[in-house]
Image (cartoon, rainbow, N blue to C red):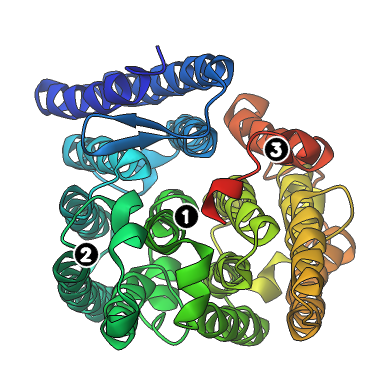
Amino acid sequence: MVYYGPFICILILMLSGLILLSTRRKWKIQLLSGSAFFLCAFFMWISYRSFSKIQVEQLYLGHVFMLNALNLVLAFTFMIVNMLIIWFSYYAIHKYMDETAFNPYYGSLLVMNAFITMILFLDDTRWLYGAYFLVILMSYNLIKIKVNNAVQYEKTKFIVLNLFGLLLLAVGFMMLKELSGTTRIHLLRDYINLERLNYLTLSVTLCIIGLGINGALFPFYSWLPDLYSAMPATLSAHLSSITIKVGPIIMMKILYDGLGSMWFSEIEIDRVLVVLGGLSMLTGSLFAIYQRDIKKMIAYSTISQLGYIYLGMGLANSLGIQIAIYQIIAHTITKSAIYLSVSSIYEQAGTTIIEDLKGIGKEMPVTLMCFTMAALSMIGIPLLPGFINKWYMSLSAIANGSVVPVFIILISTILNATYYLPIIINGYYGKHNVSDKVFLSKAKPLKEVVPLIILVVMMVLLGIFSNEYFDINPVHYYF
């Protein structure tokens, strides 16, 4: 099964997207979409269990695919989270779009995730670029379907900047091909010539800028906050928790699968990523503090949390890359829980203005509890994934003999608490908006928040059993 699991999942997602074109009823469209992701999660889990019995670190399939335990776990996480978001959306999607838009929306979502799945396992820059290009186009199609014309400028900025990023990435990939004579990522390091170090530095720099635009790396994230805050929270959950991770994942492939830590450090890209990742963490949080709309605050928080991924990559040791991948998994689950909590609040309260959410915990206790748990993880409360990430990233920095990243993490943690804790406290104890209101007056039925609760449980388990993750794969083949 390990040989066929990823291919089966890609096929399921592609076929499901095509079948949706002839499906008309809302419940059938969503049932098919959710079932497709559930089946893919099942096959990814079976593939992971089969892979663990082979006892190899990497498995190459044909000339373009590469499997390891971590990309199977990433794919499994993406499938489960997609399924839960669709489950949650079943009860609210009609509030955001007309039924005539269901087919193109869910079809684009399925096809986009087929290409994301492909990217996780690709080991060839030509195929990787093609799949990434299609992910960007599918993302834009989803945004067009669900974002109104009032934010046309933000939609235009998204596609223009990302097409520019794709152009830079194409040039970077072509330079790597000219330098090494191969498009196989894991063979790059074997053909690098010290005499062409400047050429290598330029090609990798172009790749990082090109991928950093879609991956919201400082200072290329200007397209994200206004656009994500304008979209329905369910779509923001898909894009913020999963799609935006594609850039950092491809970057990891180039820098670690391709160059390895020796060449990566030789051209000093590691220091650049530490600086840019740290600036993403700090500026994202600083801008988040001053937002009045909770959706825009969360959008800036996404930039900050992505900074942890880049910082982990820049630390350029085995613990750093492991914790960067752990952050991808943790942020996928946690950010989905936060966005769905906000979606639930908006659907019942009709507002996302922070000042108007004082006392919302009296009316929607389960929803605010889920938001609270996810926010506490973002802050870094012990046992939750956010704490695990910050703790091990600090250890990774200390192992490199540098304390500057530790101070950046500490400052970022304080900033995270600055904008999340007031919402939590005022949500439970604020009386500004709840005088003479009935307890549970805006609460959703339990069946509608079950996916949100499952996400929070997954998040807690990921923190408690984090040691299981670190035992999956030591990733020492990068180093």
Which dot marks residue 469?
3
**Helix or strand or loop: what does disc 1 sit on?**
helix
Residue in the picture at 35% in, 50% down: 186
Corner quadrant of residue 402: bottom right
Q: CA distance from mark 2 to mark 3?
A: 34 Å
Pointer 1 or 2: first along the chain: 2
Residue wearing tag 2:
180
Circles 3 and 1, Cβ within 8 Å, touching? The answer is no
Q: Give the position of the N terminus as an image quadrant.
A: top left
Residue 334 in view of the camera:
no
Pointer 3 or 1: first along the chain: 1
How many neighbours does mark 2 have within 10 angstroms: few (below 14), some (14-19), or many (20 or more)? some
Residue in the picture at 26% in, 43% down: 112
Q: Give the position of the C terminus as an image quadrant.
A: bottom right
Which dot marks residue 310?
none
Residue 91 in view of the camera:
yes
Q: Nearer the viewer, residue 70 or 371?
A: 70
- Extreme left residue here? 22
Q: Nearer the viewer, residue 255 or 336?
A: 255
Residue type indicated by callout 3: Tyr
Residue type indicated by callout 1: Ala
In x, y percent, where is residue 176?
22, 68
Residue wearing tag 1:
233
In x, y percent, where is residue 379?
78, 65
